[in-house]
Amino acid sequence: MEPVVATSFIPKRPVSTEPVSTPHKSAAVGLLSFITIIVVIGTVLAFGGVYLYQQSLVSKKTQLQTSITQAQDGLGSSFVSDMKRLSNRINGVKTLLQNHVVVSPIFAALQATTLQSVQYKSFTYEFTTDPGTKTKLVQVHIEGVAKNYATLALQSDAFAKSTIIRNPIFSDLTVEDKTQQIDFKLLFTVNPSDLSYQTFINSLPTNPLNTTPAASVTANPTSQ
């Protein structure tokens, strides 16, 4: 008879069928979830801040529009219309003054340069364009009488000293039978800028040269 060998098995650990979890993997998953929550919360807060800021801008815009409306109502629409008309009138006056032409500088230049033995009978002026330079000019026509031919020569030299009278030309010289004086026609040009109202105002403090005043002149302005 074979001997019976008694065996015994005592497990050192309890037998379990559940899988063994890894501590490192669980910790990583928890950290990722925490970061995700933080990002979501930050996004919500940022969106809320932008929304509140937008509402604040809308509210300020509404308040500003209300203030403007109240200011307009306080001034009154008639007052605003009157101010607009006044502004248009002021601008119109400024334009008129800038384009306004005065002939006083021409008379002052004639008074400063005309000899005592020369008299003028008529005076007319017109606006024209220089055919060569295409610039605007004021053309002056004068009819007068001089003592003799020598006087006309001296008068031409006197005109050359003027800063306003340009290119003076004497023509149609005739001798009067009774007085033996010389009838003449005079043509010269003036730069419109020398006749502007602003230039005239600026020149008021400066006194023109005082010489013997010319005879009375009948002005007859014409324009083209």
Image: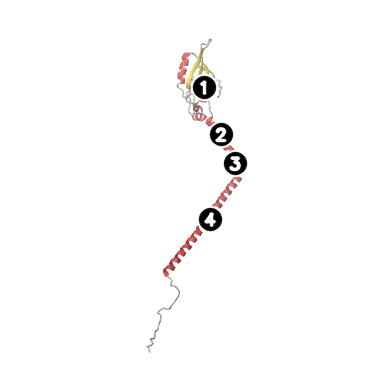
Query: In x, y percent, where is residue 51?
Result: 53, 55
Q: Earlier in the sequence, mark 2 or mark 1?
A: 2
Amino acid type of disc 3?
A: Val
Vertical side of 86 occupied by 157: above or below: above
Q: Work out whether 93 lies above or below 58.
A: above
Quadrant (top left/top right/bottom left/bottom right) for the C terminus: top right
Circles 1, 4 touching at the beta carbon (< 8 Å): no
Q: Position of residue 60 (x, y in %)?
A: 55, 51
For the residues bearing labels 3 and 2, Cβ distance under 8 angstroms: no
> Which numbered disc, 4 or 3, marks the residue that appears first in the sequence?
4
Residue 95, by quadrant, is top right
Extreme residue in the front direction: 1
User: Could you say where residue 29 lies in the image, as x and y percent from the top left?
Assistant: 45, 66
Residue 92: give its label.
2
Taking the spot 46% from the left edge, 19% from the top edge, the residue there is 158
* Residue 208: % across, % down: 48, 25
Mark 3, secondary structure of its residue: helix
Residue at which label 3 appears: 80
**Label of residue 51 in the image:** 4
